[in-house]
Amino acid sequence: MKKNIQTLSSIVLSALLLASCSKSANAPVAPEKKDNAAKVLTYIQSLGFSQRNIVDNGDAYIVDDDIRFPKDMKVPGGKASTEQRWSGSKLTAANALNVRIKVDPSMTSMMPEINSAIDQWNNIGGDIALHFSIVDDAPYDILIRDADLGEGICGRGTFPSGGSAGNLIQINKTLIAGNSFAQRQRTITHEIGHNISITHTNEPNGAIVPGTPATDANSLMNGGQCNVGATVLSNYDKIAARWLY
Ligand SMILES: [Zn+2]
């Protein structure tokens, strides 16, 4: 576990999946895939994540235990300045207004928690154009499914790519089953935050959202706080979401 309070504010960053990802899904593994993985690794490092927090997990790199970067993601081009990182990373306005979540059968037992999480993001209030809904079938933007993520890792999200929300949220259902309802829905709310590009408030990585403080103990987007962290979005979490969308 890392120190909880290290940094600045609600932070955001993101990433793009290769637009042609689905088209090439059945193609043989090509050298370019390996090359792209190297680019993804360089990109992760450019965001400020230290090497010791990056784990190679086969088809993706895992950072800070609960954020995945698919090796076939589209790495934003150009210099890694804050603006460019932002411009290439978040959902398009149209996609932000219609984020479709499909719940895998492995997670339907936690539908009340999922609905609570969605309600939090749908009810931020003020000047924001962000809306989530549950869909039963394809097309969808985010799949939520159960996964054994190992000891102590409650969930894992994916940053946006190509203007769309990150496509996968994994929840370690067995691990969080003993938590309170509020904490179970916190885990889901937190991972959804990653899938719309918000990273850990208490980690020094990503681009800082203007108007947010150096630290926010009430932030639901603080990392490493499964079963002990905030269960509702803080005022600054909402400011970050409004600034993005
Ligand atoms: Zn997280």
Image: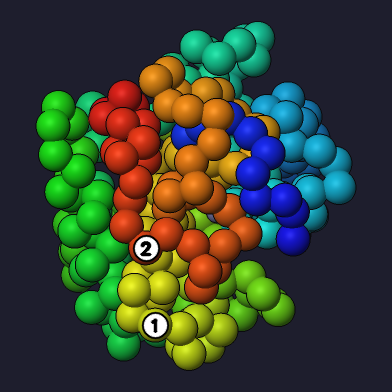
Mark sitting earlier along the chain (2/1): 1
Amino acid at circle 1: Ser
Question: In the displayed structure, does residue 39 sit left or right of residue 175?
Answer: right
Mark 2 near mark 1, Cβ–Cβ under 8 Å? Answer: no
**Residue 233 sits above or below residue 214 on the image:** below
Looking at the picture, the colour scheme in use is rainbow
- Reading the image, the residue beneath label 1 is 180
Q: Which residue is mark 2?
A: 231
Instruction: Find numbered disc 2 in the image and state the secondary structure of the residue it sits on.
Output: loop
Q: Looking at the image, is 60 positioned above or below residue 138?
A: above
Q: In front here: 138 or 185?
A: 185
Q: Crowding at label 2, few (<14), some or many (≥20) Cα neighbours within 10 Å?
A: many
Ligand 1 resides in the quarter of the picture at: bottom right
Q: Residue at x 47, y 34 (%)?
A: 10
User: What residue appears at the point 74 percent right and 37 percent down from the top-left corner?
Assistant: 49
Asked if the residue at label 2 sits under 8 Å from ligand 1, the reply is: no
